[in-house]
Image: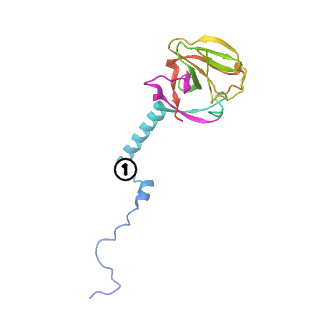
Amino acid sequence: MTSPEEAPSGPPPAPARRGALSRFFFPAVNRWFLLRLSLVAALTALFFGFLCVPARIEGHSMEPTYRDGGFAFCWRPRFWIHPPKPGRVVMVRIAGRRLMYLKRVVATSNDTVEFRKGELWVNGVRRQEPYALGPCDWELPPRLVPTGHLYVIGDNRTMPIAEHTFGSVPLGRIEGGPAW
């Protein structure tokens, strides 16, 4: 007979299995984990570097639609198939992909654009612009949008016309549109 003080011989007890939540937040670092981590990092860099480029909004020209200091993502595939139509917001490349303007398309190729007493006229027809912040006193003589260009302008028309950057932009400079 064995005495109660003697330990039973046999294998040591198995360690307690980690829970699924613990394994999710603290995975075992092995070669499969490192491969998955590398793949996710590469796909993220490609996605946010080429398809959905982050951008910080600086300036008041697109208020009230987009606020100064805000944040947006430029969804580059937005206009790959169809060019933007009037009323759409676009991101215009100025110098590389790191410097872009955020503007609204108001006219397309071969349209005539003008401002009369602060109102936008395209091809002799007054445009309703519910998104534009007014009142506006802009005066701009008629101008023809060249072929292969769009006419873009900001929504904040309370700013003096001299403080705005706007006008004809080649279609090739349109990087995409804001994701939201």
Q: Residue 136 at x, y = what percent?
A: 71, 23
Q: Residue furthest left?
A: 1
Q: Give the amino acid at mark 1.
A: Asn
Q: Nearer the viewer, residue 120 or 171?
A: 120
Give the residue pinned by disc 1. 30
Q: Quadrant of the C terminus?
A: top right
Chosen colour scheme:
rainbow
Q: Residue 61 at x, y = what percent?
A: 66, 27
Helix, strand or loop at disc 1?
Answer: loop
Q: Quadrant of the N terminus?
A: bottom left
Q: Residue 7 at x, y = what percent?
A: 33, 80
Q: Is residue 26 visible?
A: no
Q: Residue furthest front?
A: 125
Q: Which residues are magenta?
A: 69-95
Which residue is located at x 48 percent, y 34 percent? 48
User: As displayed, is residue 95 above or below residue 179?
Assistant: above
Tag count in the figure?
1
Q: In the rendered image, which quarter is residue 123 located in?
A: top right
Reply yes or no: does residue 119 show up in magenta: no
Q: Residue 143 at x, y = what percent?
A: 61, 11
User: As displayed, is residue 9 above or below residue 170?
Assistant: below
User: As displayed, is residue 170 above or below residue 16?
Assistant: above
17 sits to left or right of 99? left
